[in-house]
Amino acid sequence: MLRGVGRWQLRNSVKWMVTSSSTLAASSSSLAPSASRLASERGAKTIPLASRERSYPVRALRPTRAATASLVDGEERRASSSKASSSSSESDANDLPLRFAEAARSTGAFHPGDLVLVCVSGGADSVTLLHLLVQLRDAWNLDVRAVHFNHETRGDESADDAVFVKALCARLDVELHIRVPEKPFAPSNFQANARQWRRDATVELLESLEANVALQGHHADDQTETTLLKLLRGCHISRVAGMRPREGVFGRPLLSFAKRELVAFLESRAETWREDPSNASPKYLRNRVRAELIPLLRELVDEGGVEARIEALTEQSAHLRELLDDVPSAYLALGDGPVTSASPFDRSYLVRGEIDLDAWSRLPTLAREDQLRAYVSDCAGVDMEYHVLRKMCAHLFARANTDVNAAAVPEWEWRIRGDWVLCSVGSRAWAAKKPRLDLGANEGKQTSDANDGDGDAEARAVGNEVVVDAGRGVSITHPPGWLVRASWENSASTDSSDEGVRLENLPDVCALRLRFRQPGDAFRSGHSRRVKLKDWMRGNGVPLHARDRTPLVCLGDDILAVYPHLSANASRSDDGSAKDVRNGARLNLVVDCVSVDDAETANEFE
Protein backbone atom coordinates (compact mmCIF):
# COMPACT_ATOMS: atom_id res chain seq x y z
CA MET A 1 0.00 0.00 0.00
CA LEU A 2 1.09 3.58 -0.65
CA ARG A 3 2.02 5.79 2.27
CA GLY A 4 3.20 9.34 2.93
CA VAL A 5 1.05 11.97 1.23
CA GLY A 6 -1.79 12.17 3.78
CA ARG A 7 0.47 13.06 6.73
CA TRP A 8 2.45 15.57 4.66
CA GLN A 9 -0.81 17.25 3.69
CA LEU A 10 -2.05 17.41 7.29
CA ARG A 11 1.07 18.85 8.80
CA ASN A 12 1.45 21.57 6.18
CA SER A 13 -2.26 22.46 5.93
CA VAL A 14 -3.58 21.93 9.45
CA LYS A 15 -3.70 25.59 10.40
CA TRP A 16 -5.61 26.49 7.27
CA MET A 17 -8.03 23.57 7.71
CA VAL A 18 -8.81 24.43 11.34
CA THR A 19 -9.52 28.05 10.45
CA SER A 20 -11.86 27.31 7.58
CA SER A 21 -13.52 23.92 7.63
CA SER A 22 -15.90 24.98 4.91
CA THR A 23 -13.13 24.72 2.35
CA LEU A 24 -12.25 21.13 3.27
CA ALA A 25 -13.67 19.67 0.10
CA ALA A 26 -11.58 21.99 -2.01
CA SER A 27 -8.49 21.08 -0.07
CA SER A 28 -8.89 17.46 -1.09
CA SER A 29 -8.17 18.37 -4.68
CA SER A 30 -5.31 20.71 -3.88
CA LEU A 31 -3.76 19.04 -0.85
CA ALA A 32 -0.61 17.50 -2.27
CA PRO A 33 0.74 18.54 -5.61
CA SER A 34 2.62 15.25 -5.56
CA ALA A 35 -0.63 13.29 -5.64
CA SER A 36 -1.76 14.70 -8.96
CA ARG A 37 1.79 14.55 -10.24
CA LEU A 38 2.07 10.92 -9.21
CA ALA A 39 -1.25 10.13 -10.84
CA SER A 40 -0.20 11.71 -14.12
CA GLU A 41 3.18 9.98 -14.01
CA ARG A 42 1.86 6.57 -13.08
CA GLY A 43 -1.74 6.36 -14.21
CA ALA A 44 -1.41 7.32 -17.85
CA LYS A 45 0.29 4.14 -19.04
CA THR A 46 1.49 0.70 -18.06
CA ILE A 47 5.15 0.16 -17.29
CA PRO A 48 6.77 -3.11 -18.43
CA LEU A 49 9.09 -5.02 -16.11
CA ALA A 50 12.16 -5.86 -18.16
CA SER A 51 12.97 -9.06 -16.32
CA ARG A 52 9.67 -10.82 -17.06
CA GLU A 53 8.11 -9.13 -20.13
CA ARG A 54 4.97 -8.26 -18.19
CA SER A 55 3.02 -5.03 -17.86
CA TYR A 56 1.25 -3.93 -14.73
CA PRO A 57 -1.28 -1.06 -14.49
CA VAL A 58 -0.33 1.71 -12.11
CA ARG A 59 -2.74 2.69 -9.36
CA ALA A 60 -2.97 6.43 -8.76
CA LEU A 61 -3.13 7.80 -5.24
CA ARG A 62 -6.65 8.91 -4.30
CA PRO A 63 -7.04 10.74 -0.97
CA THR A 64 -10.62 10.53 0.35
CA ARG A 65 -12.58 13.27 2.08
CA ALA A 66 -13.71 11.01 4.93
CA ALA A 67 -10.20 9.80 5.71
CA THR A 68 -8.90 13.35 5.56
CA ALA A 69 -11.60 14.74 7.87
CA SER A 70 -10.99 11.98 10.42
CA LEU A 71 -7.29 12.63 10.51
CA VAL A 72 -7.85 16.41 10.73
CA ASP A 73 -9.91 15.99 13.89
CA GLY A 74 -7.08 14.14 15.59
CA GLU A 75 -4.52 16.60 14.30
CA GLU A 76 -6.57 19.55 15.55
CA ARG A 77 -6.67 18.13 19.07
CA ARG A 78 -2.90 17.62 19.14
CA ALA A 79 -1.82 20.71 17.21
CA SER A 80 -0.98 22.92 20.18
CA SER A 81 0.90 20.26 22.17
CA SER A 82 3.00 19.06 19.21
CA LYS A 83 3.96 22.42 17.77
CA ALA A 84 7.44 22.43 19.26
CA SER A 85 8.20 18.81 18.35
CA SER A 86 6.86 19.37 14.83
CA SER A 87 9.22 22.29 14.38
CA SER A 88 12.10 20.16 15.61
CA SER A 89 11.18 17.30 13.24
CA GLU A 90 11.06 19.68 10.28
CA SER A 91 14.48 21.02 11.21
CA ASP A 92 15.87 17.47 11.46
CA ALA A 93 14.33 16.58 8.10
CA ASN A 94 15.82 19.66 6.44
CA ASP A 95 19.36 18.98 7.61
CA LEU A 96 19.20 15.21 7.04
CA PRO A 97 21.09 15.40 3.71
CA LEU A 98 23.98 17.21 5.42
CA ARG A 99 24.09 14.74 8.31
CA PHE A 100 23.85 11.86 5.83
CA ALA A 101 26.90 13.08 3.93
CA GLU A 102 28.85 13.50 7.18
CA ALA A 103 27.92 9.97 8.28
CA ALA A 104 28.98 8.50 4.93
CA ARG A 105 32.30 10.30 5.10
CA SER A 106 33.04 9.26 8.69
CA THR A 107 32.00 5.61 8.33
CA GLY A 108 33.30 4.96 4.81
CA ALA A 109 30.00 3.40 3.74
CA PHE A 110 30.72 4.85 0.29
CA HIS A 111 33.07 7.46 -1.14
CA PRO A 112 33.01 10.38 -3.59
CA GLY A 113 33.29 9.18 -7.18
CA ASP A 114 31.79 5.75 -6.44
CA LEU A 115 29.42 3.88 -8.71
CA VAL A 116 26.80 2.89 -6.13
CA LEU A 117 24.08 0.27 -6.51
CA VAL A 118 21.09 1.04 -4.26
CA CYS A 119 18.78 -1.76 -3.14
CA VAL A 120 15.29 -0.23 -3.36
CA SER A 121 12.30 -2.17 -2.09
CA GLY A 122 9.94 0.80 -2.18
CA GLY A 123 9.79 1.12 1.61
CA ALA A 124 10.46 4.38 3.43
CA ASP A 125 14.07 3.52 4.32
CA SER A 126 15.25 2.57 0.82
CA VAL A 127 13.28 5.39 -0.83
CA THR A 128 14.88 7.90 1.55
CA LEU A 129 18.31 6.46 0.80
CA LEU A 130 17.73 6.85 -2.94
CA HIS A 131 16.59 10.46 -2.56
CA LEU A 132 19.58 11.35 -0.37
CA LEU A 133 22.02 9.82 -2.86
CA VAL A 134 20.41 11.68 -5.74
CA GLN A 135 20.74 14.95 -3.80
CA LEU A 136 24.40 14.14 -3.17
CA ARG A 137 25.04 12.88 -6.70
CA ASP A 138 26.51 16.04 -8.22
CA ALA A 139 28.48 17.23 -5.20
CA TRP A 140 30.13 13.80 -4.71
CA ASN A 141 30.31 12.85 -8.39
CA LEU A 142 28.31 9.67 -7.77
CA ASP A 143 27.00 7.28 -10.41
CA VAL A 144 23.75 6.05 -8.85
CA ARG A 145 22.08 2.82 -10.03
CA ALA A 146 19.26 0.88 -8.36
CA VAL A 147 18.06 -2.72 -8.07
CA HIS A 148 14.62 -3.93 -7.03
CA PHE A 149 13.82 -7.53 -6.03
CA ASN A 150 10.33 -8.72 -6.88
CA HIS A 151 9.65 -11.95 -4.97
CA GLU A 152 6.18 -12.23 -6.57
CA THR A 153 4.72 -13.48 -3.29
CA ARG A 154 1.96 -10.87 -2.82
CA GLY A 155 0.28 -10.86 -6.21
CA ASP A 156 -0.78 -7.38 -7.36
CA GLU A 157 0.95 -5.72 -4.40
CA SER A 158 4.33 -7.12 -5.46
CA ALA A 159 3.68 -5.92 -8.99
CA ASP A 160 2.65 -2.49 -7.74
CA ASP A 161 5.85 -2.26 -5.68
CA ALA A 162 7.92 -2.86 -8.81
CA VAL A 163 5.91 -0.31 -10.79
CA PHE A 164 6.29 2.28 -8.02
CA VAL A 165 10.07 1.82 -7.87
CA LYS A 166 10.35 2.01 -11.64
CA ALA A 167 8.38 5.27 -11.76
CA LEU A 168 10.46 6.71 -8.92
CA CYS A 169 13.76 5.85 -10.60
CA ALA A 170 12.55 7.27 -13.91
CA ARG A 171 11.64 10.56 -12.20
CA LEU A 172 15.02 10.71 -10.43
CA ASP A 173 16.94 9.70 -13.56
CA VAL A 174 18.36 6.54 -11.97
CA GLU A 175 19.03 3.38 -13.97
CA LEU A 176 16.98 0.50 -12.50
CA HIS A 177 17.51 -3.26 -12.61
CA ILE A 178 14.70 -5.61 -11.57
CA ARG A 179 15.36 -9.17 -10.45
CA VAL A 180 12.79 -11.98 -10.09
CA PRO A 181 13.64 -15.44 -8.66
CA GLU A 182 13.63 -18.31 -11.14
CA LYS A 183 11.37 -20.36 -8.86
CA PRO A 184 9.46 -19.73 -5.62
CA PHE A 185 11.28 -20.22 -2.34
CA ALA A 186 10.27 -22.97 0.08
CA PRO A 187 7.84 -21.59 2.67
CA SER A 188 9.63 -23.43 5.50
CA ASN A 189 12.68 -21.17 5.34
CA PHE A 190 11.50 -18.38 3.09
CA GLN A 191 13.15 -15.43 4.83
CA ALA A 192 16.64 -16.95 4.91
CA ASN A 193 16.45 -18.27 1.35
CA ALA A 194 15.12 -14.98 -0.01
CA ARG A 195 17.79 -13.02 1.84
CA GLN A 196 20.57 -15.23 0.43
CA TRP A 197 19.13 -14.93 -3.09
CA ARG A 198 19.04 -11.15 -2.84
CA ARG A 199 22.61 -11.07 -1.58
CA ASP A 200 23.91 -13.36 -4.34
CA ALA A 201 22.01 -11.49 -7.04
CA THR A 202 23.30 -8.15 -5.73
CA VAL A 203 26.92 -9.31 -5.81
CA GLU A 204 26.46 -10.68 -9.34
CA LEU A 205 24.93 -7.39 -10.55
CA LEU A 206 27.58 -5.41 -8.72
CA GLU A 207 30.32 -7.25 -10.59
CA SER A 208 28.61 -6.91 -13.97
CA LEU A 209 28.21 -3.14 -13.48
CA GLU A 210 31.74 -2.85 -12.06
CA ALA A 211 30.18 -0.90 -9.20
CA ASN A 212 32.08 -0.03 -6.03
CA VAL A 213 29.45 -0.74 -3.40
CA ALA A 214 25.89 -1.96 -2.89
CA LEU A 215 24.00 0.30 -0.47
CA GLN A 216 21.20 -0.95 1.76
CA GLY A 217 18.65 1.06 3.74
CA HIS A 218 19.15 -0.49 7.18
CA HIS A 219 18.68 2.14 9.90
CA ALA A 220 19.10 2.51 13.66
CA ASP A 221 15.82 0.75 14.45
CA ASP A 222 16.95 -2.24 12.39
CA GLN A 223 20.21 -2.26 14.34
CA THR A 224 18.32 -2.43 17.64
CA GLU A 225 16.15 -5.28 16.37
CA THR A 226 19.19 -7.21 15.10
CA THR A 227 20.99 -6.95 18.44
CA LEU A 228 17.95 -8.08 20.41
CA LEU A 229 17.44 -11.02 18.05
CA LYS A 230 21.06 -12.09 18.55
CA LEU A 231 20.60 -12.01 22.32
CA LEU A 232 17.36 -13.99 22.10
CA ARG A 233 19.09 -16.65 19.98
CA GLY A 234 21.94 -17.16 22.43
CA CYS A 235 24.66 -15.30 20.55
CA HIS A 236 28.16 -15.35 22.03
CA ILE A 237 28.90 -12.11 23.90
CA SER A 238 31.76 -11.28 21.51
CA ARG A 239 29.35 -11.43 18.55
CA VAL A 240 26.57 -9.18 19.85
CA ALA A 241 27.67 -6.19 17.76
CA GLY A 242 25.20 -5.65 14.95
CA MET A 243 25.59 -4.52 11.38
CA ARG A 244 28.55 -2.36 10.36
CA PRO A 245 28.36 0.65 8.01
CA ARG A 246 30.65 -1.14 5.57
CA GLU A 247 31.10 -4.91 5.24
CA GLY A 248 32.86 -5.99 2.09
CA VAL A 249 30.93 -4.72 -0.92
CA PHE A 250 27.85 -3.81 1.15
CA GLY A 251 27.36 -0.38 2.70
CA ARG A 252 24.73 0.83 5.18
CA PRO A 253 24.94 4.63 5.43
CA LEU A 254 21.66 5.05 7.38
CA LEU A 255 22.61 3.05 10.50
CA SER A 256 22.89 6.18 12.64
CA PHE A 257 19.41 7.47 11.70
CA ALA A 258 16.10 6.45 13.28
CA LYS A 259 13.17 5.33 11.15
CA ARG A 260 11.10 8.35 12.25
CA GLU A 261 13.77 10.67 10.79
CA LEU A 262 13.52 8.96 7.42
CA VAL A 263 9.73 9.15 7.40
CA ALA A 264 9.83 12.83 8.40
CA PHE A 265 12.24 13.52 5.54
CA LEU A 266 9.88 11.97 2.97
CA GLU A 267 6.81 13.68 4.40
CA SER A 268 8.52 17.08 4.37
CA ARG A 269 8.99 16.65 0.62
CA ALA A 270 5.57 15.16 -0.14
CA GLU A 271 7.19 11.90 -1.19
CA THR A 272 5.38 8.57 -0.99
CA TRP A 273 6.52 5.05 -0.28
CA ARG A 274 5.17 1.52 -0.15
CA GLU A 275 4.27 -0.56 2.91
CA ASP A 276 4.77 -4.34 2.86
CA PRO A 277 2.02 -5.98 4.96
CA SER A 278 4.32 -8.93 5.70
CA ASN A 279 6.43 -6.59 7.86
CA ALA A 280 3.55 -6.60 10.36
CA SER A 281 2.96 -10.37 10.32
CA PRO A 282 3.42 -11.89 13.80
CA LYS A 283 4.70 -15.17 12.33
CA TYR A 284 8.17 -13.62 11.93
CA LEU A 285 10.18 -13.15 15.12
CA ARG A 286 11.72 -9.86 13.95
CA ASN A 287 8.26 -8.37 13.49
CA ARG A 288 7.25 -9.35 17.02
CA VAL A 289 10.45 -7.86 18.42
CA ARG A 290 9.66 -4.63 16.57
CA ALA A 291 5.96 -4.48 17.46
CA GLU A 292 5.92 -5.98 20.97
CA LEU A 293 9.31 -6.27 22.66
CA ILE A 294 10.87 -2.90 21.79
CA PRO A 295 7.79 -0.82 22.79
CA LEU A 296 7.70 -2.70 26.10
CA LEU A 297 11.39 -2.06 26.73
CA ARG A 298 10.89 1.62 25.99
CA GLU A 299 8.15 1.71 28.62
CA LEU A 300 10.38 0.05 31.21
CA VAL A 301 13.47 2.14 30.51
CA ASP A 302 13.94 5.89 30.59
CA GLU A 303 13.29 7.85 27.41
CA GLY A 304 15.91 6.91 24.85
CA GLY A 305 17.46 4.48 27.30
CA VAL A 306 16.88 1.27 25.36
CA GLU A 307 18.78 2.35 22.26
CA ALA A 308 21.57 3.90 24.35
CA ARG A 309 22.01 0.76 26.42
CA ILE A 310 22.02 -1.51 23.37
CA GLU A 311 24.54 0.73 21.66
CA ALA A 312 26.78 0.58 24.74
CA LEU A 313 26.49 -3.22 24.78
CA THR A 314 27.42 -3.54 21.11
CA GLU A 315 30.41 -1.25 21.57
CA GLN A 316 31.69 -3.34 24.46
CA SER A 317 31.14 -6.48 22.40
CA ALA A 318 33.13 -4.97 19.53
CA HIS A 319 36.02 -4.16 21.87
CA LEU A 320 35.96 -7.71 23.20
CA ARG A 321 35.96 -8.98 19.62
CA GLU A 322 39.14 -7.00 18.97
CA LEU A 323 40.83 -8.58 21.99
CA LEU A 324 39.81 -12.10 20.99
CA ASP A 325 40.97 -11.58 17.41
CA ASP A 326 44.45 -10.79 18.78
CA VAL A 327 44.67 -14.07 20.73
CA PRO A 328 47.04 -16.61 19.06
CA SER A 329 45.02 -19.13 17.10
CA ALA A 330 45.03 -22.83 17.93
CA TYR A 331 43.68 -23.60 14.45
CA LEU A 332 45.91 -25.56 12.07
CA ALA A 333 45.03 -25.04 8.42
CA LEU A 334 45.67 -27.62 5.73
CA GLY A 335 49.42 -28.20 5.51
CA ASP A 336 50.20 -26.48 8.83
CA GLY A 337 51.80 -28.03 11.89
CA PRO A 338 52.48 -26.81 15.42
CA VAL A 339 55.44 -24.47 15.70
CA THR A 340 56.71 -26.65 18.54
CA SER A 341 56.92 -29.77 16.36
CA ALA A 342 59.22 -30.60 13.45
CA SER A 343 57.72 -34.02 12.83
CA PRO A 344 56.52 -34.53 9.22
CA PHE A 345 53.64 -36.58 10.64
CA ASP A 346 52.37 -33.65 12.71
CA ARG A 347 51.16 -31.49 9.84
CA SER A 348 47.47 -31.36 9.03
CA TYR A 349 46.24 -33.19 5.95
CA LEU A 350 42.60 -32.26 6.57
CA VAL A 351 41.12 -29.85 4.04
CA ARG A 352 39.04 -28.18 6.77
CA GLY A 353 41.99 -28.00 9.11
CA GLU A 354 41.83 -28.93 12.79
CA ILE A 355 42.40 -27.65 16.32
CA ASP A 356 45.68 -28.18 18.15
CA LEU A 357 44.38 -29.07 21.61
CA ASP A 358 47.74 -28.47 23.26
CA ALA A 359 47.68 -24.82 22.18
CA TRP A 360 43.91 -24.51 22.60
CA SER A 361 43.90 -25.72 26.20
CA ARG A 362 46.40 -23.01 27.20
CA LEU A 363 44.06 -20.21 26.09
CA PRO A 364 41.72 -18.31 28.44
CA THR A 365 38.23 -19.81 28.71
CA LEU A 366 36.55 -17.12 26.61
CA ALA A 367 39.15 -17.51 23.86
CA ARG A 368 38.73 -21.31 23.86
CA GLU A 369 34.99 -20.94 23.44
CA ASP A 370 35.38 -18.35 20.72
CA GLN A 371 37.88 -20.35 18.64
CA LEU A 372 35.88 -23.57 18.89
CA ARG A 373 32.69 -21.73 17.91
CA ALA A 374 34.43 -20.17 14.91
CA TYR A 375 35.88 -23.51 13.77
CA VAL A 376 32.55 -25.35 13.96
CA SER A 377 30.77 -22.47 12.23
CA ASP A 378 33.30 -22.36 9.38
CA CYS A 379 33.34 -26.14 8.86
CA ALA A 380 29.77 -27.18 9.51
CA GLY A 381 27.91 -23.90 9.07
CA VAL A 382 26.41 -24.33 12.54
CA ASP A 383 26.17 -21.45 15.02
CA MET A 384 25.88 -23.19 18.37
CA GLU A 385 23.89 -21.75 21.22
CA TYR A 386 26.10 -20.74 24.11
CA HIS A 387 24.97 -23.43 26.55
CA VAL A 388 25.85 -26.11 23.95
CA LEU A 389 29.18 -24.46 23.19
CA ARG A 390 30.06 -24.23 26.89
CA LYS A 391 29.31 -27.92 27.45
CA MET A 392 31.33 -29.02 24.42
CA CYS A 393 34.28 -26.88 25.51
CA ALA A 394 34.21 -28.35 29.00
CA HIS A 395 34.37 -31.93 27.67
CA LEU A 396 37.10 -31.10 25.16
CA PHE A 397 39.15 -29.22 27.75
CA ALA A 398 38.95 -32.18 30.13
CA ARG A 399 40.26 -34.47 27.39
CA ALA A 400 43.04 -32.06 26.48
CA ASN A 401 44.28 -32.17 30.07
CA THR A 402 44.23 -35.97 30.28
CA ASP A 403 47.16 -38.25 29.45
CA VAL A 404 46.28 -38.87 25.81
CA ASN A 405 48.72 -41.77 25.59
CA ALA A 406 46.90 -43.71 28.29
CA ALA A 407 45.27 -46.83 26.90
CA ALA A 408 42.04 -46.11 28.75
CA VAL A 409 41.44 -42.87 26.83
CA PRO A 410 39.05 -43.68 23.97
CA GLU A 411 38.46 -41.75 20.81
CA TRP A 412 35.79 -39.10 21.37
CA GLU A 413 33.00 -37.77 19.17
CA TRP A 414 30.40 -35.07 19.76
CA ARG A 415 27.38 -34.92 17.47
CA ILE A 416 27.15 -31.24 16.47
CA ARG A 417 24.06 -31.30 14.29
CA GLY A 418 22.79 -33.50 11.51
CA ASP A 419 25.68 -35.40 9.90
CA TRP A 420 28.36 -33.27 11.53
CA VAL A 421 30.47 -34.52 14.44
CA LEU A 422 33.46 -33.12 16.30
CA CYS A 423 36.13 -35.82 16.66
CA SER A 424 39.04 -35.86 19.06
CA VAL A 425 42.02 -38.19 19.16
CA GLY A 426 45.20 -37.42 21.05
CA SER A 427 46.03 -33.72 20.84
CA ARG A 428 43.80 -32.83 17.89
CA ALA A 429 40.12 -32.18 17.28
CA TRP A 430 38.43 -31.87 13.88
CA ALA A 431 35.01 -31.77 12.24
CA ALA A 432 33.82 -34.61 10.03
CA LYS A 433 30.61 -35.68 8.31
CA LYS A 434 29.28 -38.99 9.59
CA PRO A 435 25.64 -39.63 8.78
CA ARG A 436 23.46 -41.32 11.36
CA LEU A 437 22.11 -43.69 8.72
CA ASP A 438 23.72 -45.54 5.83
CA LEU A 439 22.86 -43.32 2.88
CA GLY A 440 24.30 -45.73 0.31
CA ALA A 441 27.17 -45.18 -2.06
CA ASN A 442 27.26 -42.04 -4.16
CA GLU A 443 28.76 -42.49 -7.57
CA GLY A 444 30.12 -39.68 -9.70
CA LYS A 445 33.19 -38.06 -11.16
CA GLN A 446 35.89 -37.41 -8.61
CA THR A 447 38.61 -34.79 -8.85
CA SER A 448 42.25 -35.78 -8.78
CA ASP A 449 45.26 -33.98 -10.14
CA ALA A 450 47.88 -36.25 -11.68
CA ASN A 451 50.45 -35.58 -14.38
CA ASP A 452 52.56 -38.13 -16.24
CA GLY A 453 54.64 -35.55 -18.05
CA ASP A 454 52.46 -35.75 -21.15
CA GLY A 455 49.34 -34.06 -19.76
CA ASP A 456 46.73 -34.45 -17.03
CA ALA A 457 45.79 -37.99 -16.07
CA GLU A 458 42.17 -39.05 -16.00
CA ALA A 459 40.37 -40.08 -12.82
CA ARG A 460 37.31 -42.30 -12.73
CA ALA A 461 35.06 -43.36 -9.90
CA VAL A 462 34.84 -47.04 -9.06
CA GLY A 463 32.24 -47.56 -6.39
CA ASN A 464 33.36 -45.33 -3.55
CA GLU A 465 36.96 -45.05 -4.68
CA VAL A 466 38.81 -43.00 -7.26
CA VAL A 467 41.24 -44.51 -9.77
CA VAL A 468 43.90 -42.29 -11.32
CA ASP A 469 45.90 -43.32 -14.38
CA ALA A 470 49.38 -42.00 -13.57
CA GLY A 471 50.84 -43.19 -16.87
CA ARG A 472 53.65 -45.65 -17.65
CA GLY A 473 51.56 -48.60 -16.52
CA VAL A 474 50.85 -47.23 -13.03
CA SER A 475 47.40 -46.59 -11.58
CA ILE A 476 46.61 -45.05 -8.20
CA THR A 477 43.43 -45.81 -6.23
CA HIS A 478 42.41 -43.61 -3.33
CA PRO A 479 39.25 -42.85 -1.27
CA PRO A 480 36.94 -40.02 -2.32
CA GLY A 481 37.69 -36.61 -0.90
CA TRP A 482 41.47 -37.05 -1.13
CA LEU A 483 43.56 -34.74 -3.31
CA VAL A 484 46.49 -36.57 -4.89
CA ARG A 485 49.11 -35.48 -7.40
CA ALA A 486 51.47 -37.74 -9.34
CA SER A 487 54.27 -36.93 -11.76
CA TRP A 488 57.31 -38.66 -13.23
CA GLU A 489 60.86 -37.42 -12.89
CA ASN A 490 64.36 -38.69 -13.59
CA SER A 491 66.14 -40.18 -10.60
CA ALA A 492 69.23 -38.14 -11.46
CA SER A 493 67.28 -34.89 -11.27
CA THR A 494 68.50 -32.44 -8.65
CA ASP A 495 65.82 -29.76 -8.97
CA SER A 496 62.89 -31.78 -7.67
CA SER A 497 60.76 -30.49 -4.79
CA ASP A 498 60.90 -31.83 -1.27
CA GLU A 499 57.19 -32.64 -1.02
CA GLY A 500 55.74 -36.13 -1.33
CA VAL A 501 57.43 -39.52 -1.69
CA ARG A 502 59.42 -40.85 -4.67
CA LEU A 503 58.81 -44.43 -5.72
CA GLU A 504 61.50 -46.20 -7.77
CA ASN A 505 61.67 -49.63 -9.40
CA LEU A 506 57.92 -50.12 -9.61
CA PRO A 507 56.78 -53.20 -11.58
CA ASP A 508 56.00 -52.84 -15.30
CA VAL A 509 52.28 -52.75 -14.54
CA CYS A 510 51.21 -51.99 -11.00
CA ALA A 511 48.20 -50.72 -9.11
CA LEU A 512 49.07 -48.53 -6.14
CA ARG A 513 46.51 -48.00 -3.43
CA LEU A 514 46.29 -45.18 -0.89
CA ARG A 515 44.48 -45.89 2.37
CA PHE A 516 44.57 -45.51 6.15
CA ARG A 517 45.95 -48.21 8.43
CA GLN A 518 44.06 -51.42 9.13
CA PRO A 519 44.36 -54.07 11.86
CA GLY A 520 47.28 -56.42 11.23
CA ASP A 521 49.27 -54.03 9.01
CA ALA A 522 53.03 -54.64 8.97
CA PHE A 523 55.79 -52.49 7.55
CA ARG A 524 59.43 -52.92 6.47
CA SER A 525 61.40 -49.68 6.47
CA GLY A 526 64.55 -49.83 4.37
CA HIS A 527 66.44 -53.08 4.96
CA SER A 528 65.08 -53.61 8.47
CA ARG A 529 62.95 -56.56 9.43
CA ARG A 530 59.18 -56.47 9.02
CA VAL A 531 57.41 -55.03 12.10
CA LYS A 532 53.86 -54.29 13.12
CA LEU A 533 52.83 -50.92 11.75
CA LYS A 534 51.49 -49.73 15.12
CA ASP A 535 54.87 -50.52 16.72
CA TRP A 536 56.74 -48.72 13.94
CA MET A 537 54.52 -45.65 14.39
CA ARG A 538 55.14 -45.54 18.11
CA GLY A 539 58.87 -45.95 17.65
CA ASN A 540 59.10 -43.24 15.01
CA GLY A 541 57.15 -40.57 16.86
CA VAL A 542 53.93 -40.59 14.86
CA PRO A 543 51.49 -38.67 17.13
CA LEU A 544 48.45 -40.53 18.41
CA HIS A 545 46.04 -38.27 16.54
CA ALA A 546 47.83 -38.92 13.22
CA ARG A 547 48.06 -42.70 13.33
CA ASP A 548 44.62 -43.37 11.89
CA ARG A 549 44.87 -40.45 9.44
CA THR A 550 48.35 -40.97 7.96
CA PRO A 551 48.18 -42.03 4.27
CA LEU A 552 49.73 -45.39 3.41
CA VAL A 553 51.03 -46.15 -0.10
CA CYS A 554 50.42 -49.84 -0.76
CA LEU A 555 51.27 -52.30 -3.52
CA GLY A 556 49.19 -55.40 -2.98
CA ASP A 557 49.70 -56.44 0.64
CA ASP A 558 52.96 -54.50 0.97
CA ILE A 559 53.15 -51.01 2.44
CA LEU A 560 55.65 -49.03 0.38
CA ALA A 561 55.42 -45.80 2.34
CA VAL A 562 53.98 -44.37 5.50
CA TYR A 563 53.47 -40.93 4.03
CA PRO A 564 55.71 -38.99 3.82
CA HIS A 565 58.23 -41.65 5.03
CA LEU A 566 59.53 -43.93 2.24
CA SER A 567 60.28 -47.64 2.65
CA ALA A 568 62.80 -49.79 0.74
CA ASN A 569 62.69 -50.22 -3.03
CA ALA A 570 59.38 -51.51 -4.26
CA SER A 571 60.59 -54.23 -6.63
CA ARG A 572 63.68 -56.44 -6.60
CA SER A 573 65.06 -59.23 -8.79
CA ASP A 574 65.40 -62.83 -7.71
CA ASP A 575 68.95 -62.25 -6.47
CA GLY A 576 67.85 -59.26 -4.35
CA SER A 577 69.22 -56.53 -6.60
CA ALA A 578 66.98 -53.61 -7.49
CA LYS A 579 65.11 -53.65 -10.78
CA ASP A 580 64.99 -50.60 -13.04
CA VAL A 581 62.33 -51.07 -15.71
CA ARG A 582 61.80 -47.35 -16.48
CA ASN A 583 65.34 -46.19 -17.18
CA GLY A 584 65.72 -44.32 -13.93
CA ALA A 585 62.28 -42.67 -13.93
CA ARG A 586 60.58 -42.45 -10.56
CA LEU A 587 57.07 -41.57 -9.52
CA ASN A 588 56.68 -38.50 -7.33
CA LEU A 589 53.49 -38.98 -5.31
CA VAL A 590 52.03 -36.06 -3.31
CA VAL A 591 49.01 -36.26 -1.00
CA ASP A 592 47.70 -32.73 -0.52
CA CYS A 593 44.78 -33.63 1.70
CA VAL A 594 42.73 -36.55 2.96
CA SER A 595 39.10 -36.86 3.97
CA VAL A 596 37.98 -38.22 7.32
CA ASP A 597 34.33 -38.07 6.28
CA ASP A 598 32.41 -41.27 5.74
CA ALA A 599 32.56 -42.40 2.11
CA GLU A 600 28.93 -41.43 1.50
CA THR A 601 29.55 -37.80 2.46
CA ALA A 602 33.07 -37.49 1.04
CA ASN A 603 31.57 -37.40 -2.44
CA GLU A 604 29.38 -34.49 -1.37
CA PHE A 605 32.40 -32.59 -0.08
CA GLU A 606 34.18 -32.89 -3.42
Image (cartoon, rainbow, N blue to C red):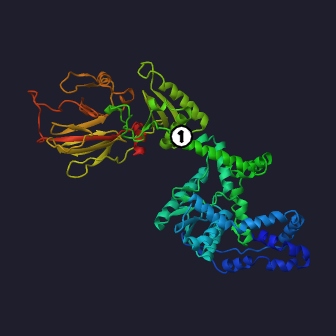
Q: Which residue is mark 1?
A: 324
Relative to the observer, which residue lies in front, 164 or 237? Answer: 237
Considering only vertical position in the picture, is 80 above or below 603? below
> Which residue corresponds to the image point at 64% horizontal and 80% vertical from the top-left?
45
**Position in image of residue 17 (x %, y %):** 87, 74
Relative to the observer, which residue lies in front, 387 or 367? Answer: 367
Q: Image check: 362 left or right of 460?
A: right
**Position in image of residue 507 (x %, y %):** 16, 37
Q: Residues within 10 Å of mark 1 (few under 14, many from 20)?
A: some
**Position in image of residue 176 (x %, y %):** 56, 71
Q: Image check: 35 left or right of 154?
A: right
Q: Image check: 133 left or right of 451?
A: right
> Which residue corresponds to the image point at 28% horizontal and 44% vertical from the top-left?
485
Identity, as a three-letter code, of the amino acid under mark 1: Leu
The answer to whether residue 156 is visible is no
**Position in image of residue 300 (x %, y %):** 79, 45
